[in-house]
Amino acid sequence: MTQRTIAALVAVPLLLALFAVAVFTPLPYATYAPGLTVDVLGTTEDDGKGSGDGETKETEETGEVEIIQVDGHEVYRDEGQLRMTTVFVSLPGAEKTLPELIGAWFDEDRAVYPYDAVHDEDETVEESRRTGAIDMVSSQDQAVAVALEELGYQVTPAVMAAYIEKDTPAEGVLEVGDLFLRVNGTAVSAPDQMAELVAATPEGEPVEIDLLRDGEERTVMLLPEQVDGQARVGVTLGTGYRFPFEVSVNIDAQIGGPSAGLMFSLAIYDALTPGALTGGKSVAGTGTISADGEVGPIGGIQQKIAGARRDGADLFLVPEDNCADALGAEAGDMRLVRATTMHEARLAIEAYAEDPDAKLPSCED
C-alpha cells in the first residue's frame, strides 16, 4: 500500500466528518419568509375570545366574525380588499443548519440575517410572543384613533391594559383593552403614574381599580403580590383611547407586532364610510401607525411584498423608510405606492380606485 493510498484512507473519513459537522452544526442566523395575508375587511374564525373591547358579531351560519367590529355606528360592508401582510420569522433559539440557510439564500422571496440582528441574545419564544401581543394591541387602538380622527371625531388618550401576565392577581380579573380610570380613588392619566400608585399599595392590602370595559364603568379589587419589594398585579400598561363609540379589531391572536397599524386604520375608515375605498380592488400593505397618523417602517418588506403578490393584490402600500428595500423585491404586476401618512395613503387608494393609471406617490420618486 503506497503512502498516497494510506493518506487517502485517512483523509476521506476526516473530510466526511468535517462535512457532517458543517451540515448539521447550528449556525447563528435567522430567516424571513413570506407569511399569510389577511383581508381586514373580511371575516375570521370565531375562537370565542375576540381581541378588542366590543362583542364579536358572527356572520350568518358560518361560525366566523367580522374582523372590524363596530357598536354604535353604521357599518358599510362593500366589495374590495384591504390586506394586512405578515412575515414568517424563525423563532428565538431555532437552530438553522447550512442546507437550510443555503436554501433560503437562493430563494428570492426569503432572506437570511445574522441572528442578533433579529433576536436578542437571551430572548425566548415566550418573550417574543409577549412583545408581539403587546405591540398588536397597541397598534389596534392607535389605528382606531387615527381612523376616527380622519373622520373628524375626537378621541381621548387613556391608560390601557396591553397584556395580562399568567398566574398573577390580574389574571381572570382584568382584560386586555381595559381602560383604567382611577387607582385607590386617584385619577390616572399615564401608565407610569398608574404603576406608581399600584406599587405604593401597602403590603397585604388590596388595590381598588376603577376601569372602563365595553363602554361600562366597573370597579375591581386586587391583592397585589410583592415582586422585588414592590406591589405588582401582573398587567402591562400601554396607551389606549376613549372613543365616541366602540370599535375593535378581531384578529387571530397568533399574529403579533405593530406592522398592521396602517391597514387597520384604512379598514376601519372604509367600514365607517359608504362605498368601497378600494373601488372593489385588492390593496395590500404594511406599516406601523403613530398617534399623528404617520406611517413607520417595518421588517421583512420584501417578504411581505412577495406574500401580497402571491395572493393577487393589485397595489401595495410601502412605508417611506422601506422604499429602498421594496424596490429590490419582485412585485410582478402589483403596483408599489409610497405611504407616508394614513391620510396620504387613503387619498392614493381613492385615486387608484378611480383610475388605476393615476399618478401616485412612488418609491422611485
Image (tube, rainbow, N blue to C red):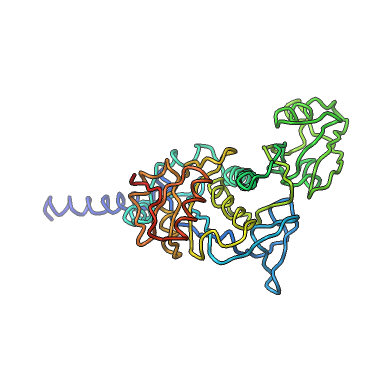
Residue 236 in the image: state x and y as whole percent: 69, 38
Q: Is residue 156 above or below residue 287?
A: above
- For this rendering, which residue is in front, 169 or 28? 169
- The image quadrant that residue 225 belongs to is top right
Residue at the spot 53% in from the left edge and 47% down from the top edge: 259
**Residue 331 location, quadrant:** bottom left
Q: Residue furthest bottom?
A: 61
Q: Is residue 282 above or below residue 146?
A: below
Closer to the camera in the image, 344 or 331 = 344
Numbered label tally: 0
Residue at horizontal 77 percent and vertical 31 percent from the top: 188
Please state the horizontal and vertical placement of residue 357, each as a whole percent of the image.
37, 59
Residue 226 appearing in the image = yes
Nearer to the camera, 148 or 198: 148
For the residue pair 325 and 7, the one nearer the viewer reads as 325
Taking 234 as reference, is 315 above or below it? below
Evaluate whether residue 126 shows in this view. Answer: no
Relative image position of residue 3 (x, y in whole percent): 12, 50
Instruction: State the quadrant of the C terminus.
Output: top left
Q: Is residue 165 left or right of residue 359?
A: right
In the image, 334: left or right of 214? left
- In the image, residue 278 lies at what x, y percent? 51, 60
Specify the quadrant that holds the N terminus. bottom left
Residue at the image point whose x is 75% and y is 55% from the top: 72
